Image: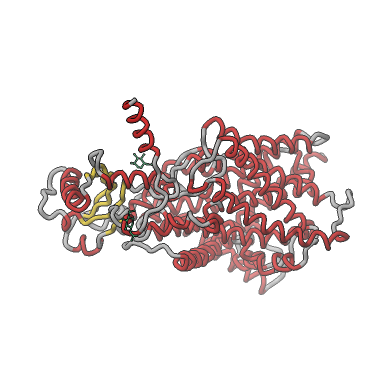
Amino acid sequence: MFFKACIFALFLRANAVIYKLNDTEYDRMPSLYELDNYEKCLRSDGLYCVVKITLSASPDNQLMRMIQEYSEARIHYNHTYIDWGICVSSRCKNYDLKGDTRLSIEKCLNQSFYNEHRLEAKITVHYCNNSKERHQYDFGDWIFGFVLAFIISLNILATLYDIRLRIFNNEIGNQYLLGFSIIRNWGLLVAHHNDPNFNKFVSIHGIRTILSFGMVLGHTMFIFCSGFVDNPEALEQAYQTPFSYIIFNGPMVIQTYFIISGCLFSYTLAVNPHWLKSFFVPILYRWCRLTPGLALLLGFITTWYRHLGTGPLWNFYVSPVVNDCKQYWWSHILYFNNYIKEYCNIQTWYLAADFQMYAIALILFIATRNRGRIFAIFLLFFIGCAGPVLHDWLQDINGVFITYPEVYRTFSDDSFAVVYVSFYNNLCCFSMGLILGLLTFNANKYKIYFSKHKRILTPLFWTLCLLVLLLFMSGYFLYPNGERPSLHIRIAYSALHRPILGAIMFIGITMIIFKVEDNFRAFIEWPGWRVPSRLTYGVFLVHICIIHYIQGTRTQLYNISIFNVIIMHLGVVWMSYLFALPIYLMVKKPMSNITKLCLLYASTRFLVNKKK
Ligand SMILES: *[C@@H]1O[C@H](CO)[C@@H](O)[C@H](O)[C@H]1NC(C)=O
Ligand SMILES: *[C@@H]1O[C@H](CO)[C@@H](O)[C@H](O)[C@H]1NC(C)=O
């Protein structure tokens, strides 16, 4: 009997979770982050170390139990270990630092932790600096410099050539060289006209731009939530309000991009059916359009980037990224980096997943040239719905990705690395997009007109907007306090979240394309969206670099507040556009011009050969 009671007590104890602490109790815990003055430490020839301190204590220590129970909740940081940047030489003056640094730091911190909290500290040293680290320039830096110089001179040359042609406008000129002309590409950037075939899709510029602002906001959160802030409790408290789940549950908004991507894919192929003659030409074309910008970015990260900043946290946030890029750049170029766990350009999992779905859809469309296409698309849809369910059911991984504090801090989360980034889990919305594209193309044939029902449909549109907001807040209700509900509910959530979101977006975008609702359409079809929309790819590539730079060069703890997040977000957006502009003018557009010309040349050659 006594035994049973004991086991029961132990069991209870192991499962106790504290969801809220009042301020006095919260402050009894050692602060999660600390950052000593870096400059001052190094000026006095000191030793500066960034360490992970794992706390422990004897079993009857009440404070330690509280820390453990508080950390047990997923909506809190794990307070049983803390990350500190410390000036060892001034904090641990009385300890011998010549020998084993880790042991001396451990002894020294143990003393202060024991005096202050009656806790024991186990130290893991991330790294130590005793002078401002300067990376050696190596061969790669020179190569990148040459490549950059080559690109810039080519652009200048082409621009001068273009100017000359404009002054003496008597020749057509070399189109390949003119493809690099900045004046010309600027014209293309600000041009109002689109391909007349795609007039229906002008609204996509607006949608894409607004979504990219949202994406940058989501990633800006990493600056504040991944560590070294003085008020981590502010983030933890944010999980108590449903509205903040618009951000924490927000990553699912990427599904909208997949709908657009699928839609443009099937529409483009419907307009140009001859593309279906081969598999490799469209794939190569896509690869050639996406890769130059990406390759330049990878080149930059692996070479010049590491020289650009220093600071106590540079090796914490930036060096791992640089090292991973050095090791795995090829997986990015070949677009399967979403299946490798690494930290290089983490956002480009999207490019990889999109590329994979593109390839699969292409095969499918080629195979179903005569019939069965709709059936095949539905098959994709069901695979997309089943994927997250199976992960949840068989592997016990949340099918819907929600960013919790430890996800921000450690950046290792199965729900992200296994479910979210795998292409098959995103097929659901992509296949909806395929249907949307076919629907738009065949609108005349099937006589799809909605204008008669405007009166009914307009309120529906605004209801959908509300529903999207509710869907984003659903994580708060389904996973209260981060606790996982029963398997049935979880599976239902994993199975339904993507299709529901997809369906809402599908109906919404259809209404915009078919001109059902007018007020929102006027806003989203505003011509001003075109320019930022064309720069979106560049923004997508560079914004993470900027975010890592901000993280790596910080010398003091930041403060989490809505105002600071907004200011930071605006800053990152502006900076990203500033860099995206030259990338678009000098790399992306020229390469896509050249690719188009090559394709044209190849196809005319091919036709001539055939005629012979
Ligand atoms: C916080 O909670 C503890 C124990 O639950 C209590 O003793 C203390 O008075 C509380 N402090 C405040 C400021 O409410
Ligand atoms: C918190 O971190 C410690 C040390 O890394 C780990 O042993 C523990 O399992 C973590 N706790 C939770 C709830 O994840």
Where is residue 37 shown, x and y percent of the image? 25, 62
Task: Name the residue at the front extreme.
Answer: 1
- Of residues 355 and 87, which is closer to you in this image? 87
Can residue 300 be seen at all in this image of the molecule?
yes
- Position above or below: 577 against 252: below
What colouring style does the render use? Answer: secondary structure
For the C terminus, which image quadrant?
top right
- Position above or below: 612 against 141: above
Left or right relative to 111: residue 290: right
Left or right relative to 546: residue 38: left
- Of residues 107 and 231, which is closer to you in this image? 231
Left or right relative to 128: residue 474: right
Where is residue 385 shown, x and y percent of the image? 65, 38
Q: Looking at the rendering, which quadrant does residue 449 occupy? A: bottom right
Left or right relative to 603: residue 565: left
For the N terminus, which image quadrant?
top left
Q: Looking at the rendering, which quadrant does residue 273 occupy? A: top right
- Of residues 182 and 521, which is closer to you in this image? 521
Can residue 388 be seen at all in this image of the molecule?
no
- Position above or below: 204 against 445: below
Where is residue 534 shown, x and y percent of the image? 63, 61
Where is residue 145 shown, x and y percent of the image? 43, 56
* Residue lying at 63% horizontally and 71% vertically, measured from the top left: 164
* Residue lying at 16% horizontally and 62% vertically, measured from the top left: 44
* Residue lying at 79% horizontally and 47% vertically, measured from the top left: 438
Total number of numbered labels?
Answer: 0
Tell which quarter ligand 2 is in: top left
